[in-house]
Amino acid sequence: MPITCRHFVIALVLSATSVGQPLMRLQGLDRLYFEHVGEKEDHLQIPSFLVELLPARIQAVNFSSRKTVREMRDGELELQAEIRDFHLLMGQARGDLWLRQISVGTGAARITQLWWALYDRGHSTDVWCFTANPERTDSKALSNYEIEAASSTADSVKLRVYGSMFRPGGAWWVTGKTFFFAVEAKTLRLSRVTNDFGFFQDYGVADTSDSVDVTTEQEVGGCFQISSYDKIQEPILRACRFRNPLADETWEFNWMRMERTTHCFADKLKARVSYRSFDQPSFVERGGK
């Protein structure tokens, strides 16, 4: 049974803090089916096993950009939590911002639980949780997410997000998306999403079969251009050095390598092209199709 954002939850009261100026907020992720589960001045509901990893305050020396893994238990359930912090360097005027990511899963569950918490000068401001459970995503089959890289300027943040799902019966998909956030006063607000690339293999295709659907998306002339390549066959996949994540035991996600593969497809194949406007939600957003 997949774990959810409110699985075995307890109420943890975050005390109000006084740091001399307003704290940066993180808003807008509800567009992507994230659940807003806490902010600094109200009750934060988190699983009891995560309380120590998502405290109200964290000293700067305790953040780490290196991924760490913790074996944990929630009653009889054995869990594994991967923790990684991302430093958002936006200048002194924006404060000292860190985004903590915690991905929680079990050996048996294909759907993980993702937690993002923003810390401004060590104080937790907003906490969000995501799970790709179709009951929480308008019945859409979405991906498990994980931040691959984060970059920032004085007025924006860009998160490169790795998505994946490996389903019983052999169907799988691997995606790369970029979440853009713009600064509005003291708020980082989601502004747009680009679906940079997606590799998809449907049910009924053997693990070692090389027939894959691929999509890419990029900004062109004030809108998003979507290029689709259907049922790419083995000769082209081999020429573009495609690696099947189920058939290749050494496969691991690599953003640059997958981008190079899509560029190779674009050079060798004619795409089916469509467009969406900047204000039109993509499939992974609420209201998108």
Image: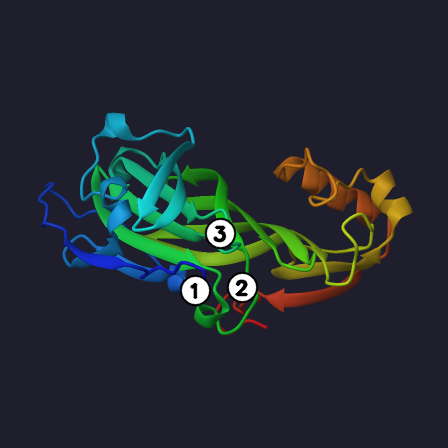
Q: What is the distance, in whole Å, between disc 1 and disc 2 at their CAs?
A: 8 Å
Q: Residue 108: where, in percent of width, then height?
A: 51, 51
Of the two numbered discs 3 and 1 on the same chain, state the one appearing first in sequence: 1
Separation of residues labelled 2 and 3 (CA atoms): 11 Å
Q: Which residue is mark 3?
A: 179
Which of the two residues, 220 or 115, is positioned nearer the viewer here? 115
Q: Amino acid at mark 2?
A: Val
Question: Residue under circle 2?
Answer: 284
* Count of numbered circles on the image: 3
Q: Please tell me how crowded label 1 is: few (under 14), some (14-19), or many (20+) other residues with Cα within 10 Å.
A: many
Indicate which disc, 2 or 3, sits on the residue closer to the N terminus: 3
Task: Nearest to the eye among marks 2 and 3: give it.
Answer: 2
Task: Tell me which residue sits at (38%, 44%) in the image.
Answer: 102
The answer to whether residue 25 is left or right of residue 31 is left
Q: Which mark is residue 153?
A: none
Q: Quadrant of the N terminus?
A: bottom left
Q: Amino acid at mark 1?
A: Tyr
Q: Does label 1 or label 2 sit earlier along the sequence?
A: 1
Q: Position of residue 40 (x, y in %)?
A: 18, 52
Q: Residue furthest front?
A: 76
- Locate the C terminus by quadrant: bottom right
Identify the residue at image location x=18%, y=39%: 57
Q: Can residue 60 be seen by looking at this rendering? A: yes
Task: Specify the quadrant of the image occupied by residue 153.
Answer: top left
**Residue 181 at x, y percent in the picture:** 42, 51
